[in-house]
Amino acid sequence: MRMEPVRDGFFDRPTLELAQALLGMLLVCVTEEGAAAGRIVETEAYIGPEDRAAHSCGNRRTPRTEVMFGPPGRAYVYVMHTHSLFNVTSGKEGKPEAVLVRAVEPVLGLELMRARRGPVKRPYDLTNGPGKLTKALGITKADYGRPLTAPPLFIAQGRPAEAVACGLRIGIEGSGEARFYPWRFWEAGNPYVSRGRGAAARE
DNA sequence: TGTACGATAAGCT
DNA sequence: GCTTATCGTACAG
């Protein structure tokens, strides 16, 4: 399998569209320990100003959200509790939007992922969650702001998602109306999605 | 299946 | 300084 980074223009589209376009793409991370890659099977869109759930809500500009105000196609990594979360920035300059990658399907570097994650009960426990996949792939806040069009961290063409489902986002209960936006996308029937395996899209 | 709690850093007062 | 957060795990039931 050839894993060529996508060209810069790939990220130049509306955030909701990008969130769906990313499904099926490969997320590749190369570290000193080796290369690891996963096929993206679940994403969520965060559209800054009008989205109370986004860190950039109301154009809030801080050192952490800064990268979202820049060009699209950069890594927005941030730490929560004991875990790191990985987003792809979207929207043109000045538009603080992003796509959260919530789950991937391991493709390359399985042994490395297992070594990083430790023993897991089920195969899909390796990467079926935002905090899990960053640990499995070796993504850290050191990758913050990195362009996703060149190694060591990049997006590559993968097998396109067959059926895409959409539904409510996860983990944003305290976000008022924003919690009802159906901005979560995943490949229907894929066992590696974080939640809602087999669950239908809700409105 | 559901609920509790950990343990870090950004952001706010 | 204090509060909250795009979560994961453990353990009870």
Image (tube, coloured by chain):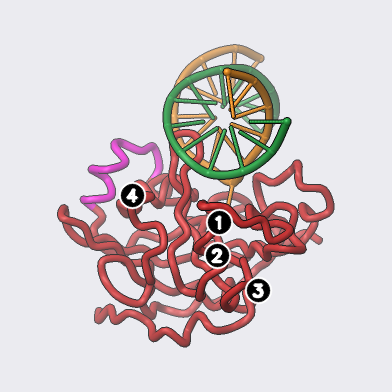
Chain colours: A red, B green, C orange
Q: Is residue A187 left or right of residue A123?
A: right
Chain where mark 3 sits: A
Chain where mark 2 sits: A
Kindly identify which numbered label has been placed on residue A16.
3
Residues marked 2 and 1 touching at CB (< 8 Å): yes
Q: Give the residue at x 44% y 45%.
A: A84
Disc 1 residue type? Thr
Residues marked 3 and 2 touching at CB (< 8 Å): no
The answer to whether marks 2 and 1 sit on the same chain is: yes
Q: Position of residue A52 (x, y in %)?
A: 75, 53
**Callout in the foreground (3, 4):** 3
Kindly identify which numbered label has been placed on residue A150.
none
**Residue wearing tag 1:** A65
Q: Is A24 above or below relative to A34? A: below
How much space separates mark 1 and mark 3, taking CA atoms?
A: 19 Å
Chain where mark 1 sits: A
**Residue wearing tag 4:** A136
Q: Give the residue at x 39% y 37%.
A: A121
Disc 4 residue type? Ala
Disc 3 residue type? Leu
**Residue wearing tag 2:** A68
Residues marked 1 and 4 touching at CB (< 8 Å): no
